[in-house]
Amino acid sequence: MIRTLARLCIVLLVLVLAPGLAPGASAAPNDDFPTTPAAKPDGSKWRLGYLEGGPYSQYPATLIATVKGLVDLDWLKPLTFPEDISPEDAHKLWEYLAKNADSEYIEFAPDAFWSGNWDEAPPREQLRAEVIERLNKGDIDLMIAMGTWAGQDLATSEVSTPTVVLSSSDPLGSGIVKSADDSGLDHLNARLDPTRYLRQVRLFHDIIGFKRLGIVYEDTMAGRTYAALDDVKTVAAERGFEVVPCTTMLDVHSGEAFRNLQTCLDELAPKVDAMYLTENNGMQLDKFPELLAPLFANDVPTFSMAGSDEVRHGVLLSIAQAGFKYVGDFHAKTIAKILNGATPRLLTQVFEAPPKIAINLKTAERIGFDPPVDILMAADEIYENIEEAPPAK
């Protein structure tokens, strides 16, 4: 089931590549702006705001990594993050930052956090109008748009507040930016990693050597983009494996998304020999015991598109959390340059994090997969148990 030693050596070589600009990416006009901390010209603090489409585990993790990057750049003093905040609760995290971040230069505005709750309340268009109206008052100096939904809503000429888009699966494919080198709007910057999902699927195939790869997605332009479907099909054509899809409604409220995803996983588990678990509203950590049950029952290896937090909760493989540090540092430098006067549009958007492996040995044991020594040696995060997330509040 495992590919040749030569293929594994190639994997190990890839793992030691340093993060940075993608091959062929050139420096942008404002990349030489300083990252040193500085208050506003009048001596007051820069006020940051936040918008997300709804709760998702990658959002707080990305925000924490970015804040740590700002700490490293001396924009705020070191702080300890509480462990009792739900991994999907960015609102609680923002409240904590608003109260506890110690900085002479920036503040996390307590009244500038917005979540669309995946359209449960308030409706998306209503929230978008509310946020834009607030931004046009001019009391927020920089917006963090977390995820594709938020990025799309602030990628408009109606907004002039500097906006940095974080944790978007594909800012180019989803229409947030004009191109990898140009966001198309002066106020906007969105990090892109054009080959991220190609690398993930190739790595998964290098390790497992599957013939039939399952994938769940919503059959809309946005849904196919979230699932990196084109990239999956590209690797399938390269490697000669079959993509086995199940389409359903996922861009809906969390309860319905979970039920729809569960139905698809139940359907696909007996038909595939590997599963690529994409980023969608149904992937809720507290629901993983139910979501993964059919995959365990059918000994199906899994790979998380989102990252190692899902490996800790039972997925077999993904990219290690260490990658968040590099991405967080990149976002922090982007924010710092903007606050030092850089135009967001004139800063580099393309950045590749290193593909470091995370693996769950308990999951491997449950599905009868014996990881080769090469993979264990290359792994940056090894989990020996499956953690259960507390119920969402």
Image: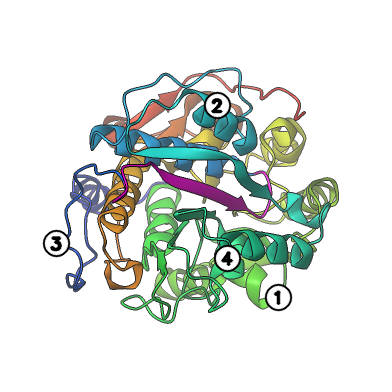
Q: Residue at x 85, y 51 (%)?
A: 256
Identify the residue position indicated by label 4 in the image. Answer: 136
x, y (%) of residue 332? 32, 46
Mark 2 lies on a secondary structure that is helix
214 with respect to 252 (left or right): left
Q: Residue at x 53, y 41 (%)?
A: 109
Q: Nearer the viewer, residue 393 or 343?
A: 343
Identify the residue position indicated by label 3 in the image. Answer: 32
Mark 1 lies on a secondary structure that is loop
Q: Residue at x 83, y 52 (%)?
A: 121
Tell me which numbered mark, 1 or 4, is placed earlier along the sequence: 4
How many neighbours does mark 1 have within 10 angstroms: few (below 14), some (14-19), or many (20 or more)? few
Foreground tag (2 vs 1): 2
How many neighbours does mark 2 have within 10 angstroms: few (below 14), some (14-19), or many (20 or more)? some
Residues at marks 2 and 1, CA–CA distance in whole angstroms: 37 Å
Marks 3 and 2 close (CB-CB < 8 Å): no
Q: Which mark is residue 96?
A: 2
